[in-house]
């Protein structure tokens, strides 16, 4: 091993008599130091040093991986209700440092798992009496706020939102209709307006206490109607506070809804029938008709730079629902024998999973979206599906751009360093696609391929596992991909001192 | 003036009686808005049951009342309901007596139900998150009262509990990393070694910690056999509760792994000619894969006859049924008979006949009937398969009665609760549900429609639903009622001093 990169690596203690490398250790509760039995410990080799392995700790919190080849490994441990920890990470948002171990050496790791954070408080009425079983939700303090979790207060009105990653949150009660009264969704401490909501800092291993809420009394509404023709459907009502799904047979009714915009999705997946509508609730609406239609057929095609067809079997098209509550989980759009794919109605986004030898340079859809924010075709592309279906076309280049280089700290190359590549809109500063991540190999080299032309930001650092846009602002390098160039971009490892 | 009555303070200028007052939280003294207050005139006082809700300041008022005696009941979510004048929880309320043009001002304090809290710990004292915990009434067999789930710290809080003695038990749980057997607090597999927990109102009983025993759980899977083939709803019941699943297109079903013990399997499916169903007991001592054959529902043939064997056709007679399974007794429902028959789901049932005033049940016979009480009580039957199951209720048209006056120091007591228990002194058992009436404004009571036999009777404000042991301790008078006799029996009000 070169002495040049030793500062960045956690070296193994040599064990002379071993025939192969051994990584063992113990996992304990960070707060109490108690051993954590049955924790899952995962070992990820860097640059092809072997397979991904997992073991569980024994009753005493001890783990040991089977004999390994010498090389660099990232070790992570996880247990229910504890935050996942990568060995060597500086803090919970940082990336772990790789363990470099020589053949016939062994190392013993001590891994401390912190618990997720929590927010606690009481839901109180106008006389400071606890409101029992009132629902409370935690949102990430983004714009719009993103729902993270929700719980029900107990008989005293006391709630505890647990399992929260460190960050800034807003706490809001859910609209609730009682026999005797009704309450509007209210941000802590007592406001229906987002900008007057109190922000709450959450850190690991701690409860942020006394985040009390006094829900505002107010009128709630009923949304009811019919499924046409009357059928048993899965019905999902979506608002910015989340989604609720129920089974409706011919008719439906949602009671106790606060005023605001809503989306209704009806689905019969076996019969491939669906319905979608968006509405604004400012009064009781009890005659909403949801007309079921056959799923629209989505025809996805690919063209190369010369207008020729590209074999679609090589492409992986992904789609995700986008509704008022946020983005859904991506699902693969699978075409059988190149036939159009039936999909439920409503707003969707489509993308193509990056391939090493292709990049997406164009996107078009019929019907067109009425309003499309500036986006890049290699990112998520919006399409609202109706019963008429859609024609979607991705234009590809078979000569995509690439970036490669070395990550250095001073003059030393850094093995196993995370490198983050962000697709960026330089005008708005918005991230346009999912962040790409790789780690440098044993020689400190990295490579990103299959890139569309455009602006990117790149950063190598152990300070983050999944940096946000604002994290990259501090030190990321703005670079531009064009044509089929494979640009050399050596990077200096970023360290927060 | 009798000292156990709450008399109104006279208010000279009013033309009709008024009952008003305030409802507050017992612990804090904070006013309770929107509490439900109901007044019930004691027999002999004109008027009907009326209810109002307290205003924001916790104040309520009933105006324009007739002079007389009223029972005042107050309830609010998460609080134990109160009857005004109760000496303590489980005592009966004392009527409020108001004169013409008089008024009564009541101050009513509502206590919260009790709760049990504790932590579930693994073998290293580390919390077990999201593990289910069950509270049982400390009876034999224990009766399921409520359940809760531990949070991320392994802490649970089971609330809404009436005062009394409880047992705490964890549910069986199968994690990726290991499984745990149901375990009583503190660490016992058997009920005999379980530690009872006392619950009182307005308090949390803390530190009911449990260390669940690691152990093997068994899988329960099988095939629901229906003709024609149709999905079946299959339920697995134990004394810990139940889990329900739906069979797939091949009739296959699978439950989450369970602890060794006694179970019951219920299945039902809609067929062309109505419901098909099945019931079978299951002893779980290994992984089980069972076949459950569903058949048309068994038919219960109900015959109601007099003591000479002649059919009785008296409108108003109702047959009540309640399902019995390992998790407890279901709610009583009126059986809908058509030509004297009704279909029942297979399994164990309790049957009872609610006679009209001119009749009393003298005898019951039925399939595999187990004598659980007197003839006018509940009778357990067991039905299975596709057959007819005759039951006969024999009625006597010569019921007995008991009547009299309740007095205290020679004065009649209006609104006094009187309890009548059909009793087996040899086995020291209650034979049917306890009967309760309140005396009228002149202190008179009557129980009619009684079967001949031994009874115990007590009038007291000390209880609102006395157990047999309470009647033992109170020295309740015992008498034998002959067929057709109306027994005169004056009672002294029992008071614990």
Image (spheres, coloured by chain):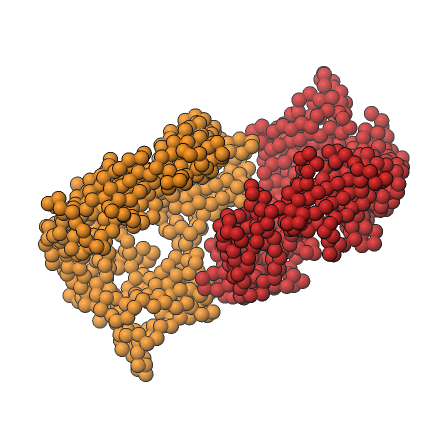
Q: Quadrant of residue B287?
A: top left
Q: Quadrant of residue A210?
A: bottom right
Q: Quadrant of residue B242?
A: top left
Give the residue displayed 20% in from the left and 40% down from the top: B365
Q: Which chain is orange?
A: B
Q: Is residue A31 visible?
A: no
* B227 and A12: which is toward the camera: B227
Quarter in which the C terminus of chain B is drawn? bottom left
Give the residue displayed 68% in from the left and 41% down from the top: A340
Give how far across and how far down residue A131 sits, in percent: 49, 59
Give the residue displayed 38% in from the left and 71% down from the top: B21
> Is B375 positioned to the left or the right of B327 in the image?
left
Q: Which chain is red?
A: A
Give the residue displayed 24% in from the left and 70% down from the top: B45
Give how far across and how far down residue B36 sits, in percent: 40, 64
> Is B110 positioned to the left or the right of A451 in the image?
left
Quarter in which the N terminus of chain B is drawn? bottom left
Give how far across and how far down residue B282 sits, in percent: 38, 30
């Amino acid at each position: 091993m070169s002495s040049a990169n030793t500062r960045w690596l956690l070296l193994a203690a040599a064990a002379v008599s071993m025939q192969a490398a051994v990584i063992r250790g113990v996992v304990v509760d960070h707060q109490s130091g108690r051993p954590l039995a049955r924790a899952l410990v995962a070992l990820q080799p860097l640059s092809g040093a072997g397979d991904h392995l997992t073991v569980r700790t024994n009753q005493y919190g001890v783990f040991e991986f089977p004999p390994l080849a010498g090389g660099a490994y990232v070790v992570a441990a996880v247990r229910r209700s504890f935050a996942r920890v990568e060995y060597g990470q500086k803090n919970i948002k940082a990336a772990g440092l790789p363990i470099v171990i020589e053949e016939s050496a062994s190392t013993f790791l001590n891994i401390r798992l912190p618990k997720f954070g929590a927010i606690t408080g009481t839901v109180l009425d106008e006389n400071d009496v606890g409101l029992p079983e009132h629902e409370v939700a935690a949102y990430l303090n983004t714009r719009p706020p993103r729902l993270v979790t929700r719980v029900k207060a107990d008989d005293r009105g006391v709630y505890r939102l647990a399992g929260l990653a460190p960050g800034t949150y807003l706490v809001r009660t859910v609209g609730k209709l009682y026999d005797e009264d009704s309450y509007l969704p209210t941000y802590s401490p007592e406001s229906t307006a987002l900008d007057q909501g109190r922000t709450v800092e959450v850190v690991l291993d701690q409860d942020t206490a006394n985040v009390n809420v006094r829900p505002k009394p107010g009128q709630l509404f009923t949304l009811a109607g019919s499924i046409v023709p009357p059928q048993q459907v899965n019905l999902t009502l979506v608002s910015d506070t989340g989604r609720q799904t129920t089974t409706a047979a011919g008719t439906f009714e949602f009671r106790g809804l606060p005023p605001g915009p809503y989306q209704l999705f009806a689905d019969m997946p076996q019969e491939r029938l669906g319905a979608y509508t968006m509405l604004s609730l400012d009064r009781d609406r009890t005659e909403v008709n949801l007309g079921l239609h056959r799923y629209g057929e989505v025809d996805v095609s690919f063209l190369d730079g010369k207008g020729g067809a590209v074999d679609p079997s090589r492409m992986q098209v992904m789609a995700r629902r986008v509704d008022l509550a946020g983005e859904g989980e991506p699902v693969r759009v699978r075409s059988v024998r190149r036939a159009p794919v039936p999909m439920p109605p409503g707003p969707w986004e489509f993308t193509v999973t990056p391939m090493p030898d292709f990049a997406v340079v164009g996107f078009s859809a019929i019907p067109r979206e009425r309003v499309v924010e500036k986006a890049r075709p290699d990112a998520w592309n919006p399409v609202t599906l109706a019963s008429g279906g859609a024609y979607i076309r991705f234009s590809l280049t078979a000569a995509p751009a690439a970036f490669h280089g070395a990550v250095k700290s001073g003059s030393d190359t850094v093995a196993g360093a995370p490198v983050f590549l962000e697709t960026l809109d330089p005008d708005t500063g918005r991230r346009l696609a999912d962040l790409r991540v790789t780690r440098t190999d044993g020689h400190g080299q990295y490579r990103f391929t299959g890139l569309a032309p455009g602006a990117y930001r790149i950063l190598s650092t152990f300070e983050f596992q999944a940096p946000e846009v604002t994290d990259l602002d501090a030190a990321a390098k703005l670079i531009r991909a064009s044509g089929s160039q494979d640009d050399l971009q050596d990077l200096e490892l970023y360290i927060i001192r | 003036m009798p000292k156990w009555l709450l008399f109104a303070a006279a208010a000279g200028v009013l033309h009709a009686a008024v009952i008003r007052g305030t409802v507050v939280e017992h612990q804090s003294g904070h006013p309770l808005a929107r509490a439900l207050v109901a007044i019930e005139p004691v027999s002999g006082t004109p008027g009907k049951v009326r209810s109002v809700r307290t205003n924001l300041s916790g104040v309520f008022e009933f105006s324009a009342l007739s002079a007389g005696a009223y029972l005042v009941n107050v309830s609010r979510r998460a609080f134990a309901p109160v009857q005004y004048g109760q000496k303590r929880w489980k005592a009966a309320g004392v009527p409020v007596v108001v004169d013409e043009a008089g008024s009564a001002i009541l101050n009513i304090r509502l206590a919260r139900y009790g709760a049990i809290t504790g932590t579930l710990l693994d073998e290293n004292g580390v919390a077990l998150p999201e593990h289910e915990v069950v509270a049982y009434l400390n009876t034999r067999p224990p009766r399921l009262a409520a359940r809760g789930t531990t949070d991320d710290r392994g802490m649970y809080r089971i609330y809404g509990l009436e005062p009394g003695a409880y047992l705490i038990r964890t549910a069986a749980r199968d994690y990726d990393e290991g499984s745990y057997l149901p375990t009583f607090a503190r660490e016992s597999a058997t009920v005999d070694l379980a530690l009872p927990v006392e619950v009182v109102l307005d308090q949390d009983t803390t530190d009911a910690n449990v260390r669940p025993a690691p152990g093997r759980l068994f899988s329960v899977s099988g095939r629901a056999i229906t003709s024609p083939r149709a999905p079946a709803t299959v339920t697995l019941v134990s004394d810990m509760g139940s889990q329900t699943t739906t069979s797939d297109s091949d009739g296959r079903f699978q439950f989450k792994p369970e602890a060794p013990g006694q179970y019951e399997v219920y299945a039902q499916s809609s067929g062309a000619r109505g419901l098909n169903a099945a019931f079978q007991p299951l002893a779980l001592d290994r992984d089980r894969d069972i076949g459950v054959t569903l058949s048309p529902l068994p038919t219960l043939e109900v015959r109601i006859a007099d003591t000479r064997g002649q059919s009785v056709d008296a409108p108003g007679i109702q047959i009540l049924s309640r399902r019995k399974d390992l998790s407890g007794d279901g709610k009583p429902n009126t059986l809908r008979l058509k030509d004297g028959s009704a279909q029942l789901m297979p399994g164990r049932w309790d049957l009872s006949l609610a006679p009209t005033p001119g009749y009393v049940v003298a005898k019951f016979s039925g399939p595999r009937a187990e004598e659980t009480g007197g003839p006018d009580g509940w009778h357990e039957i067991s039905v299975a398969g596709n057959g007819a199951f005759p039951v006969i209720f024999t009625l006597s048209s010569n019921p007995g009665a008991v009547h009299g006056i309740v007095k205290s120091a020679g004065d009649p007591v209006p609104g006094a609760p009187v309890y009548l228990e059909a009793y087996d002194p040899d086995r020291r058992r209650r034979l049917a549900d306890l009967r309760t009436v309140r005396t009228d404004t002149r202190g008179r009571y009557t129980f009619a429609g009684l079967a001949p036999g031994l009874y115990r009777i007590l009038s007291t404000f000390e209880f609102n639903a006395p157990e047999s042991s309470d009647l033992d301790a109170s020295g309740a008078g015992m008498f034998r009622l002959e067929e057709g006799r109306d027994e005169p029996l004056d009672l002294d009000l029992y008071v614990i001093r």
